[in-house]
Amino acid sequence: MYFAALLARTEDGWEASDMELDDVESLSDLIDLARSAAVDDDTVVALIEQEDAWFGVVRVDGEEDPRYYVSNAAAAARSSYGSMLTKELLGSDEEEDELDELDLDGTEDGEEEPIAAFVDDEEEAGGSGAEPVTAGPLGDPRLLDDLGVTNKQLMTLQGDALSEIAESLGATEVLEAVRL
């Protein structure tokens, strides 16, 4: 079972809305949904969680390139919505998407690449003929640093990670209202 929500930053704090994943068939759809929730092109954070298996964070700031983070790439790659994120982070060409032409690694030209994958152990998951996906986090763990969630915090979250992220953002009440 999935839980997904959008947190849109406003002048008065955060607004939360339930993200209906039934209408999301591609990463492009997810980004469009996040951008449509933005107030005055401010930051929107999409949070997706599949029980305690994995969580993902997508950050959209106006028209800038989205930034992504997945807590457990191997587990996410085995789920429909998580695989959209892991394919993007791993640079898979399988999805015909206009975003494939963009540089979505979260860096500007000349900047250091974000940490691509963190492996706590040597386990790897992968399908036949598919590129193996490492166990552990994948993406940009610094995507929420300026909002109060450090990369260390993000990488060590377990259990109810989305609530902990919301608490650090100061958005606990609005997220919990959507969860009910």
Image: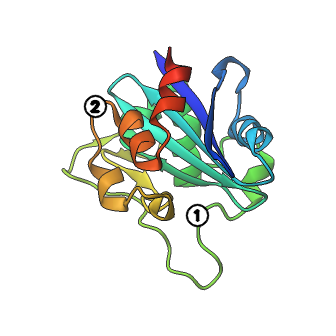
Question: Vertically, is 117 above or below 14?
Answer: below
Q: Quadrant of residue 178?
A: top right
Depth check, front residue: 173 or 53: 173
How packed is label 2: few (under 14 Cα within 10 Å), some, or many (20 or more)?
few
- Report the Cα–Cα distance between label 1 and label 2: 27 Å
Disc 1: which residue: 105
Give the camera-side residue of 106 and 143.
Answer: 143
Amino acid carrying label 2: it is Gly
Task: Estimate how packed mark 1 is, as few (under 14), some (14 to 19) or many (20 or more) residues with alpha carbons within 10 Å.
Answer: many
Name the spot of residue 96 as percent of width and height, x first: 76, 42
Between marks 1 and 2 in the image, the one whose residue lies nearer the viewer: 2
Mark 2 sits on what residue?
Answer: 159
Mark 2 residue element: loop
**Which residue does the image show at 30% across and 59% down from the upper left?**
152
Question: Which of 12 and 32 lies nearest the eye of the viewer?
Answer: 12
Under circle 1, the secondary element is loop
In percent of the image, x 64 and y 76: which residue is there?
Answer: 108
Does 31 sit above or below residue 62?
Answer: above
Is residue 127 at least partly visible in the picture? no
Residue drawn 58% across the image and 30% down it: 5
Residue 38, position as x, y percentages in the image: 75, 45
Q: Residue furthest front?
A: 12
Task: Note whether residue 174 is visible.
Answer: yes
**Kind of residue at disc 1:** Asp
